[in-house]
Amino acid sequence: MYRTLYSPQGGRIILDGREVINMASNNYLGLANHPAVVAAAKEALEKYGVATTASRNICGNYPVHDELEEKLAKFKGVEATLVFNCGVTANSGLIPQLVGKGDFIYSDELNHGSIIDGCRLSGAKIKVFRHMDMAHLEELLQEPVEGKRLIITDGVFSMDGDLAPLPEMADLADQYNALLVVDDAHGDGVMGPAGRGTVDHFGLRDRIIIETGSLSKAFGSAGGFVAGPKEFIEALRPKARSFIFTASPMAPCLTAAAAKAVDLVMENTALVDKLWENRNYFADRLSKLGLNIGTSVTPVIPIIVGDAEKAQKLSEMMYERGVYAQALQFPMVPRGTARLRTILSADHTKEDLDKVVDALEECAKALDLIR
Ligand SMILES: *Cc1c(COP(=O)(O)O)cnc(C)c1O
């Protein structure tokens, strides 16, 4: 039913017992199997054992948790952060603390499922605006309401690899007295100066003060976080339900791994630079072939096929040629925009990217996508 992985994540993986070039994981910087990250995890594993077995406010708080929160705050250029088990629970823990019954949420139609769940959990009324359509958002904001307002968006959208128009959103948030929150799960470690995220990419650190993020993608570990002003984070700590009710806060080894990953990203920009070099090289070659990469401006690059069966066929043909990239269709993406999604990593070699492009050219021609 699922394909099964028999190797660490990387540019090449052993999938169902055979080696393929991996264009499907979110291991942007190749940190999931980086020697220094593995060593940090091992050290914590040997020192603290496998798991936490108590919530952090009882007796599951380890020094590595505090260290990770401090490092993440430094990395993001914020006062404080709170670490959750994953990005999904960061959203479900945060959003109900921001708005509730009688309040209003303005949410991009392509927002990640965990944002949608967090919004539903809050009990606030949800108004969905068309993807990145700022005129539509403004139209919705013009309807007078009582109660608080929250605008929420992905920083990088994971199906198209496009970027939320945060400067326009921040202006609308100011104008209509709304709080703007960004979930930058695909932006941290990827976008902006030194990978600090989409908010920094747009130079909006002073105007967008609350973010959620994930440690499961560019940072190669598992976990999520909320970043924001110290007073806000300290108020969230005893309240966020997905934080206080779990007896398995981030395992010490995963926490230490994430902290080391943040260190590596902060130490120098080599990995982020390599990721972008790969991204730009690959995107350029695809465009020259005449393949439709939609609105991607990030290392998430869809190859839009349209027809769902064709997208599936393309994925299978690529797999036969030793390349794994996932086909996505409705309801993951709108009808008629089925695609093969590729995700670049600093772990890819140029030679492998060339192989992927050559295979794509052959398959796309066979499927009449290009001539
Ligand atoms: C992947 C993702 C999440 C979930 O993060 P996990 O740490 O994998 O649970 C949340 N939000 C967005 C926008 C994502 O892309």
Image (cartoon, helix red, strand yellow):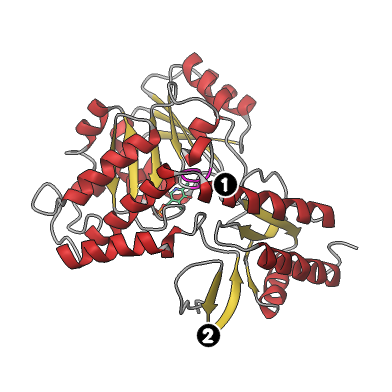
**Residue in the image at 22% along x and 55% along y:** 249
- Residue 44 point in image, percent of width and height: 22, 61
In the image, farthest residue toward the right: 371
Relative placement, left or right, of 188 versus 299 is left
Check if mark 1's residue and mark 2's residue have beta carbons within 8 Å. Answer: no
Relative placement, left or right, of 43 versus 319 is left
Relative placement, left or right, of 59 versus 290 is left
Q: Which residue is mark 1?
A: 273
Picture layout, residue 219 above or below residue 70: below
Q: Amino acid at mark 1?
A: Asp
Q: Is residue 216 visible?
A: yes
Q: Residues within 10 Å of mark 2 (few under 14, many from 20)?
A: few
**Residue in the image at 45% along x and 46% along y:** 185
Q: Amino acid at mark 2?
A: Gly
In the image, farthest residue toward the top: 175
Residue nearer the viewer, 162 or 262: 262
Say which quadrant the C terminus sits in: bottom right
Residue nearer the viewer, 330 or 53: 53
Give the quarter of the image for residue 116: top left
Give the quarter of the image for residue 181: top left
Residue nearer the viewer, 297 or 47: 47
- Residue 85 point in image, percent of width and height: 29, 54
CB of residue at label 2: within 8 Å of ligand 1?
no
Helix, strand or loop at disc 1? Answer: helix
Helix, strand or loop at disc 2? Answer: loop
| Mark 1 → mark 2, Cα distance in angstroms | 32 Å
- Residue 53 point in image, percent of width and height: 14, 62
In the image, farthest residue toward the left: 58
In the image, which residues are magenta? Answer: 186-190
Residue 46: in magenta span: no
Q: Which residue is mark 2?
A: 17
> Which mark lies nearer to you, 1 or 2?
1
